[in-house]
Amino acid sequence: MTEPRQLDPYASPKTFYGAELRRLREAAGLTQSQLGERAFCSGTYVGQFETAVRRPQPDTSKLFDEILGTGEHLQRLCRLARENKYPDYFADAAELEQMATTISEYAPMLVPGLLQVETYTRAITRAALPLASEEEVEKLVRARMDRQYLLNQSTAPQLWAVLHETVLRVPMGGPTVMHEQLIHIAQLAHSHRIMVQVLPFTAAAHALLNGMASLMTFRDAPPVVYTESAGTGQLIDEPVMVERSQKSYDLVRAASLPPMASLDLIESVAEEYTTSCAPHMT
């Protein structure tokens, strides 16, 4: 179980939800474990909601309401608590990033968000939303930049990124932006803050052809995998699917260039961006 801690119920919708869930659970005479058993989850999971560690989930809130006889009270609070600066399909994954002990990313086309420089983020956001206002674009850019504080924490997760060679070769934002972006990735790797590999074009078919994947493991919770395509994303926690994704990731990592050779390629392509409009495909 998650030990109770003092929270200001009025600090945010998420803390209010947690305080209400605890109040209602205790009024029903249930422990966290007992409520979790009835809601098909662990007592620790219930405790994470009560202490505002995790955002409330719609399906779980519906079960809580049914078990506690509270109508749609927790479901309504859940809707408020889930309002977020990130797109709804990504918000849960963004929250889990902060709790992860390891993050293993595969990027087929774009630099992973945690590794992006601001100019790169702005370029791809503008490309994806050509009719958006400057204010909307800057809001999205700032949200992504804010995520990166994670890498500067003493409790930062171990981050392993496999980048398809396409990520290096397609000049998102132009040569200057790409040079800055690739040098940033190289610097993170040289400072031992991340591990990075490149999956070369010569690898041809591979196990993660369907798109990006981010696998996260935790100290006291089961692993999850997040997948994303244009305008949508999915957080998967079903054990069989997570295990399958992990095996696919291991195969892709094995097919990639070794870390030092990957760094050499990243730095070489970065240099090409300073001498030509775009590097040649290999």
Image (cartoon, rainbow, N blue to C red):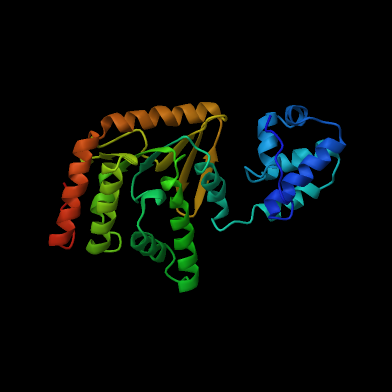
Residue in the image at 42% along x and 29% along y? 246
Horizontal arrangement in the rendering, residue 79 relative to residue 271 (left or right): right
**Of residues 189 and 181, the one drawn nearer to the viewer in this rendering:** 189
Q: Position of residue 115 (x, y in %)?
A: 36, 50
Residue 282: percent from left, percent from top: 16, 46
Nearest the eye: 50 or 82: 50
Q: Is residue 83 left or right of residue 159?
A: right
The residue at the far left in this view is 275
The mark total stands at 0
Question: Considering the image in quadrants, where does the N terminus appear?
Answer: top right
Q: Nearer the viewer, residue 273 or 11?
A: 11
Tell me if residue 41 can be seen.
no
Q: Quadrant of residue 210?
A: top left
The quadrant where residue 201 appears: top left
Q: Is residue 232 above or below residue 225?
A: below
Residue 239 can be seen in this image: yes
